[in-house]
Image (spheres, coloured by chain):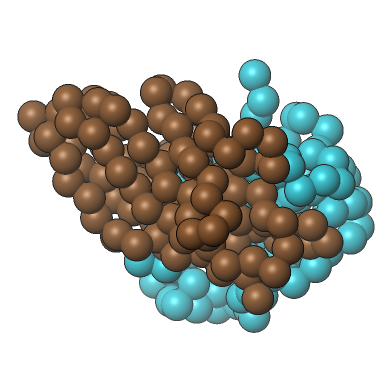
Amino acid sequence: AQSVTQLDSHVSVSEGTPVLLRCNYSSSYSPSLFWYVQHPNKGLQLLLKYTSAATLVKGINGFEAEFKKSETSFHLTKPSAHMSDAAEYFCDLTTSGTYKYIFGTGTRLKVLA
Amino acid sequence: DVKVTQSSRYLVKRTGEKVFLECVQDMDHENMFWYRQDPGLGLRLIYFSYDVKMKEKGDIPEGYSVSREKKERFSLILESASTNQTSMYLCASSGGQGIFNEQYFGPGTRLTVT
């Protein structure tokens, strides 16, 4: 069975410090993985995606994520947090043979001035 | 710029009412999805459609139905609204048959059932 686990429901960082949002997945097949961001009262916006090409994926707004098959992880990082990064972040999994996307429960990022 | 629009941002309905949530995409996407989002539960798939007039149940279809008569439009129907259907509803679309395609989301409809 496929599943996604976001290990932290809330993360707080100071402005200018690194961000790490953790995502582990379980899949019997080769996965595609996505990170989305949701600002208050908005829909989800794609940050980046992994589709079996490069394992280090760069996204918008300085975010990147590394696919580690041995650890079944796809953690999201950013070297320096900005106040505008405060939002909720969702990790998402899909696999071949299905139209379904499986979302994690989300991580709310707080950025302190 | 790609667009997924939802008919209402906020909706208040009474228990037992029939509720229609409309979603339109302008990207000629084959696939469309309805999710509900609740705090601490993430996004849960209600129904999806991979072609006109085709629909598939997601993880929580009970109490909901859908309609897709045209490629660009996907409607979610609450046959008899109940208070436990108070939630944020998100529509999304994606193109093609492959698994590499991201979803594009609408802004959401916050439904309150009283």
Q: Quadrant of the N terminus of chain A?
A: bottom right
Q: Quadrant of the C terminus of chain A?
A: top left
Q: Nearer the viewer, residue B29 or B15?
A: B29
Residue B105 visible from this viewpoint:
no
Q: Residue at x 41, y 42 (%)?
A: A76
Give the chain letter for brown.
A
The image shows residue B34 at horizontal and vertical percentages of 64, 57
Q: Nearer the viewer, residue A43 or A25?
A: A25
Q: Residue at x 52, y 50 (%)?
A: A68
Q: Residue at x 47, y 24 (%)?
A: A60
The image shows residue A96 at horizontal and vertical percentages of 79, 57
Report whether A51 appears left or right of A98. Answer: left
The image shows residue A63 at horizontal and vertical percentages of 41, 30
Residue B99 visible from this viewpoint:
yes
Q: Colour of chain B?
A: cyan
Q: Quadrant of residue B30?
A: top right
Q: Nearer the viewer, residue A53 or B19?
A: A53
Q: Quadrant of residue B28?
A: top right
B86 is higher (above) or lower (below) than A107? below
Q: Residue at x 89, y 52 (%)?
A: B51
